[in-house]
Image (cartoon, rainbow, N blue to C red):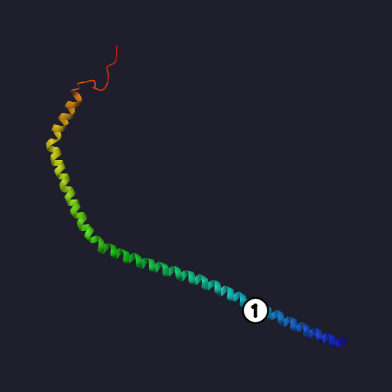
Amino acid sequence: MVRLLRQYAAQNSAGIQTLLDAERDAQKIVQKAREYRTKRVKDARTEAQKEIEEYREKKEKEFKEYESKHTSGNKKAEEDADKDTEKKLEEIKQIGSKTGPKVVEQLLKAVMDVQPRVPDRVSQPVA
């Protein structure tokens, strides 16, 4: 009977050892699966970031092309406005050079020839 118990215990021990080995193998498989999943998530993020950057560059290029096509008419208008502005400035400078000395003379005369007067609305102080 002791012999049977020992044999049964040995078989039981072998079964437990087999279960422990299977559990270790399962843990290894789960760990590898987690590592693989983590790697795939990182790869997916990197790929998504790359796609976003490519899309952004594409849209910026399209915008620049659109902008260059639609602002070429504005450049002509700006050049015309600049020419017109330069022309007006030149006219103002010519008028200023002709009438400038006369204006300065009138300003100096107004400042130097002071003729104090009491305004009509202010009452005279009583002495």
Residue situated in front as seen by the camera: 47 or 80: 80
Q: Residue at x 28, y 62 (%)?
A: 67
Q: Residue at x 61, y 74 (%)?
A: 31
Q: Work out whether 127 lies above or below 51.
A: above
Residue 104 x/y as whole percent: 17, 31
Q: State the quadrant of the N terminus.
A: bottom right
Residue situated in front as seen by the camera: 120 or 69: 120
Q: Work out whether 120 lies above or below 60.
A: above
Find the residue positioned furthest to the top.
Answer: 127
Q: Residue at x 68, y 81 (%)?
A: 22
The crowd level at tag 1 (other Cα within 10 Å; few <14, some 14-19, many 20+) is few
Is 30 left or right of 123, judged from the image as shown?
right
The three-letter amino acid code for the residue at tag 1 is Ala
Is 37 left or right of 82, judged from the image as shown?
right
Residue ID for mark 1: 26
Secondary structure beneath dot 1 equals helix
Residue 6 x/y as whole percent: 83, 85
Q: Work out whether 14 lies above or below 100.
A: below
Residue 109 x/y as whole percent: 16, 26
